[in-house]
Amino acid sequence: MGLFRTSLLVVLSCAVMSAQAANFNTKSKISTQSEPVSSVTTPMPVKGLEGVGINTMALWSRGSLIRTERELLEHIKPLEEFGFSHVALISCADWIIDRNCPRGEDEKRIIKFVRTLVEKTNLHVVLSLKPYDFWEVEGKQTSALQQSLEKDIETQDKFVNAWKNLASELKDISRDRLSFNLLNEPEFELPQVTAEGRDLWLSIATKAIGAIRSVTDDRVIILEGIGKSLFAHRGKGSYYKYGGVDTLLKTLPFKDIVYGVHNYEPTAFLQQSMPLRGKKPGVPYSEKIARGVWKDAALLASWANKNKVPVILSETGCIGYVDGKSEGPKNEEDCGKYAKDVYDAYVANGMPVTWWALEHAKTIYLRDADPGDKWLPWRGLTPNPHIFSGLRLVNVKLKPQAGSASSISEKLKSDAAFAACVMKQGLEWGAPAATVESVIERAKQGSPKHIGRVEELISDGACGQ
């Protein structure tokens, strides 16, 4: 019995000199007044990247419940009705350095899933690679792939070749349907962000872009900056730690490059979870936070117009409301207020936004009453009306999907053949009959924990799910 099945059975049964750095990390005071945002004059090279998109962790998160192409399609398809223009498929890239991804992602699986979304939805797809095996150093997260990419020439060559292979395998797909994001949140920030680190990343990116363009010379590519592209990251007080976008990112001499940045400021509002982010919950949205949103957008728009390039806010999002005190902001409409300011400050001024994310604590769906970093709410998928309104999305009531918590609970109660199949799966996995029967009964009653156990038992497509 494999380690995963054994684990389920157990559950069922129970360096730059400081002077150089000081000159590089120029600080600038954030205004306390709202600031007008200039419209970005350089348009997106493809229409699919305009407006509002969303990131999905289906091929990255250890908590992902997506195993098959059909499950991915059911997971993503509603985004069309909601009015999203694009979906960024965040994909584990540890296979580049011969490490295993949490759900077995590799080059072949990524290609297959990209094709599924292109062929069976009308969404523009962004393929985005992201390291997974991560840990914390000096208060910053880093990863095995990232560290190797920064220090090892062989890994840099593997990274470039990986993109060339992906480009070759997907070269028949029109640029109107598919873009690439070279690396989600490049780091190059230990012990701190430096010009040398930035230029090293840009040299690697230049090679990767050249390799892609040698296969498909018109593919649109999103390039993010070092320091996880957090261009508006605050230092102590009200200062921009990096002083501006140039500290993290410079333009390259290629056409059709979209420059991507991330923003989770203020973290005290957007990251409200003690267990997940170490931030106390219950903080409301405020005019001060709103002024910061507009100030950051003005900074990005100014950089884009100065360099005559298109830009995208390729990540921002808000840990969702639960009850105002255990996790998330104080009021259920707070994340929606933030979303509205993001839309008005960025999207309305020619800077598209890709929301983080479809899943987990920053989901676009209403969260369950009990907090936690779940893949999706167990009680069914109901669009968060405040976030949808803020982002100008269409609030469509979804039908229960096969495999969703609500449909599994109802099907166990109404379909004896389905319940028998779940029992058979549990027995084949080596669980005692009494244990499986108990799990089924608790799942019928709507227990999220036990519905999750049933989902794991049928995750390989068994029982028609």
Image: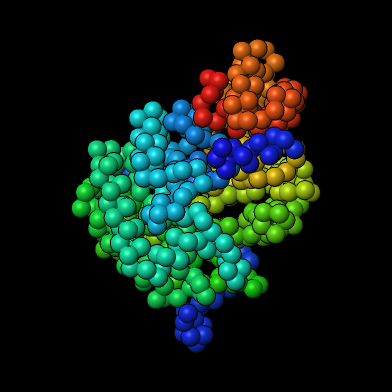
The quarter holding residue 116 reads: top left
Residue at the outermost right position: 325
The quarter holding residue 47 reads: top left
- Which residue occupies the foreground of this view, 159 or 187? 159
The quarter holding residue 372 reads: top right
Left or right of 112, for residue 335: right
Q: Residue at x 51, y 56 (%)?
A: 133
Left or right of 419, for residue 167: left
Residue 35: horizontal and vertical position, in percent?
55, 61
Q: How is the image coloured?
A: rainbow
Quadrant holding the N terminus = top right
Left or right of 159, for residue 192: right
Q: Say whether residue 461 is visible.
A: yes
Q: Say whether residue 381 is visible.
A: no
Q: Compared to 190, does 59 lie above or below?
A: above
Quadrant holding the C terminus = top right
- Which residue occupies the foreground of this view, 432 or 146? 432
Residue 360: horizontal and vertical position, in percent?
61, 43
Q: Residue at x 43, y 40 (%)?
A: 86
Residue 62: horizontal and vertical position, in percent?
56, 45
Residue 235: horizontal and vertical position, in percent?
60, 72
Q: Residue at x 29, y 55 (%)?
A: 161
- Which residue occupies the foreground of this view, 319 or 337? 319
What is the count of numbered marks? Answer: 0
Q: Residue at x 52, y 63 (%)?
A: 142
